[in-house]
Amino acid sequence: MTLANYAAPGTLEEATALLRQGSCTILAGGTDLMVQSKAGKVRFGDTLVNISRVAGLGGIAVEGATLRIGALATIAELRESDVVRDRLPALWRAADKFASGQIRNASTVGGNICNASPAGDTLPPLIAHGALVELATRPNGKVERRAMPLEGFITGPGKTRREAHDLVSAVLVPLPQADTIGLFEKFGTRPALDISTVSVAFVGRARKGTVSEARLVFGAVAPTPLRGAATEAAIIGKFLDEATIAKAADTAAQEVKPISDVRATAWYRREMIHNLTRSVLTDVARR
Ligand SMILES: Cc1cc2nc3c(=O)[nH]c(=O)nc-3n(C[C@H](O)[C@H](O)[C@H](O)COP(=O)(O)OP(=O)(O)OC[C@H]3O[C@@H](n4cnc5c(N)ncnc54)[C@H](O)[C@@H]3O)c2cc1C
């Protein structure tokens, strides 16, 4: 394939100005994009914009009551972050279960979001935490930023509400109260280096086995990560005894909308969602 132009901007101003010219493809870690390009699934635009040198797009920092995770923060950086491990354990666990060291070093959070795979591992915990996506664009010579909920940002496999001239600049995660429980379970066909066949993230609060708040998000069982509204309703305000957990696991298996593909059949995915939901809620009941 011949590439018309390649650009490696050093500032957000330069990067967003390039995107305004149109027909650009953004490259971050390349762990999805290059694989998809080699497989003929993606055709680059006129300019390949490598954003990996853009200043200020990386890092993980507490800003008041929010954790700001730069779009170029890598999965390895999430995994090494004390604040992610201590305050956002569901996200930390997703980073810990993500691929191999080599892939974690290159993979960015912004790339995981924009690739918009139903199986993207950071998505269920980030949505369960009520994260916002920050987008940067340069309509009139000046960079403008806006934020929107990650829940709803992804509209289908590989599809988001991002406009072609937008760069995802960060993900903003509200820091939860200290007694918040965060859990993430992923099942793949191999123990290592595997994309999720199904995943479950839980973020919520419980006191002596009774749930006061719950956000459950399922991965790889619908065209987008799926909020488990019916399962949440089945546990909020309830004491998590065996019967309640079993009923909630049944509800979860019913509300997901899996397909059969190379990784698993729809039937198997429902079974795994049932089992992972039961496992996660049993863990919540023990806290
Ligand atoms: C062997 C292997 C194992 C993997 N295992 C896992 C796994 O366990 N879990 C998992 O979730 N994923 C996994 N992946 C997929 C991939 O590593 C992740 O989705 C990764 O986070 C993508 O980030 P990246 O920086 O490499 O994105 P890139 O490949 O550079 O980009 C991905 C897409 O996002 C767009 N993009 C990137 N950054 C931005 C931005 N800031 N603004 C706007 N658009 C942007 C690109 O244009 C492209 O469309 C695996 C991949 C491989 C090859």
Image (tube, rainbow, N blue to C red):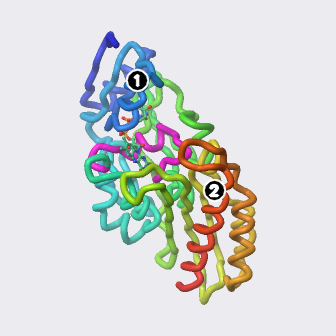
**Residue at 58 percent of width and 76 percent of height:** 205
Q: Which residues are magenta?
A: 104-121
Rendered position, 239 above or below 38: below
Rendered position, 48 above or below 247: above
Secondary structure type for disc 2: helix
| Local crowd size for mark 1, using a 10 Å CA cut-off: few (<14), some (14–19), many (≥20) | some
Q: Amino acid at mark 1?
A: Thr
Could you say which is closer to the camera, residue 137 or residue 263?
263
**Residue at 43 percent of width and 68 percent of height:** 89
Which numbered tag is attached to residue 43? none
- Give the residue pinned by disc 1: 25
Residue 129, how many percent across, how many down? 53, 60
Could you say which is closer to the camera, residue 19 or residue 274?
274
CA gap, disc 1 and disc 2: 36 Å
Location of the N terminus by quadrant is: top left
- Give the residue pinned by disc 2: 268
Residue 103 painted magenta: no
Residue 215 quadrant? bottom right
Numbered marks: total = 2
Could you say which is closer to the camera, residue 261 or residue 97?
261
Residue 245, how many percent across, how many down? 68, 77
